[in-house]
Image (cartoon, grey):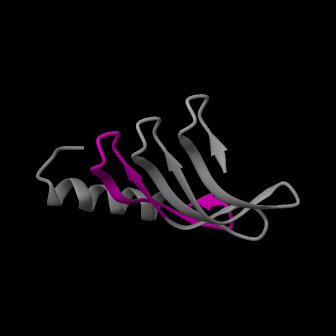
């Protein structure tokens, strides 16, 4: 677990041989969750990631889709567009 100088949790993530693996949660210094995601066994981002604003609200859920550590920008763009349409916001 990585921590801010203030002692608050910065990131919860498992390591294997110095490589991130498994679920990951990153926090703002105020303690609210910044993002939630997953790393594969090679330390690459995988699956769908969620991003939260500093006040605890969901910014875009989900906001990115990864395959083998590479962002699927087309899928991520669709998710963002759908979110903004649901919120009646112009992106």
In the image, taking residue 26 as reference, residue 32 lies left or right, namely left
Residue at the far right: name it.
17
Total labels: the figure holds: 0
Residue at the far front: name it.
7
Q: Is there any visible trace of residue 72 in the rendered image?
A: no
- Tell me the quadrant of the picture where the C terminus can be found: top left
Q: Which of 90 and 30 is in front in this view?
A: 30
Residue at the far left: name it.
88
**Residue drawn at 41 percent across, 52 percent down:** 51
Whether 43 is among the magenta residues is no
Q: Which of 91 and 18 is in front in this view?
A: 18
Q: Is there any visible trace of residue 34 in the rendered image?
A: yes
Q: What main secondary structure does the magenta stretch of the protein show?
A: strand
In the image, taking residue 11 as reference, residue 15 lies left or right, namely right
**Residue drawn at 67 percent across, 51 percent down:** 1
Q: Which of 30 and 58 is in front in this view?
A: 30
Residue 67 figure quarter: bottom right
x and y percentages locating residue 72 in the rendered image: 53, 62
Picture layout, residue 75 above or below residue 32 = below
Residue 30 figure quarter: top left
x and y percentages locating residue 57 in the rendered image: 27, 50
Q: Which of 33 and 43 is in front in this view?
A: 33
x and y percentages locating residue 80 in the rendered image: 33, 55
**Residue drawn at 47 percent across, 35 percent down:** 29
Picture layout, residue 31 above or below residue 83 = above
**Residue drawn at 64 percent across, 59 percent down:** 70
In the image, taking residue 43 as reference, residue 50 lies left or right, namely left
In the image, taking residue 65 as reference, residue 14 lies left or right, namely right
Q: Which residues lie in the magenta part?
A: 49-71
Picture layout, residue 65 above or below residue 7 = below
x and y percentages locating residue 84 in the rendered image: 21, 53
């Amino acid at each position: 677990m990585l921590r801010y100088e203030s002692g608050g949790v910065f990131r919860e993530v498992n390591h294997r041989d110095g490589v991130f693996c498994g679920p990951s949660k990153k926090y703002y210094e105020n303690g609210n969750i910044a993002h939630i995601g997953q790393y594969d066994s090679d330390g690459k981002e995988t699956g769908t990631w969620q991003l939260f604003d500093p006040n605890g609200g969901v910014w875009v859920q989900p906001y990115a889709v990864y395959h083998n550590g590479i962002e699927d920008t087309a899928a991520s763009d669709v998710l963002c567009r759908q979110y903004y349409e649901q919120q009646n916001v112009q992106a």
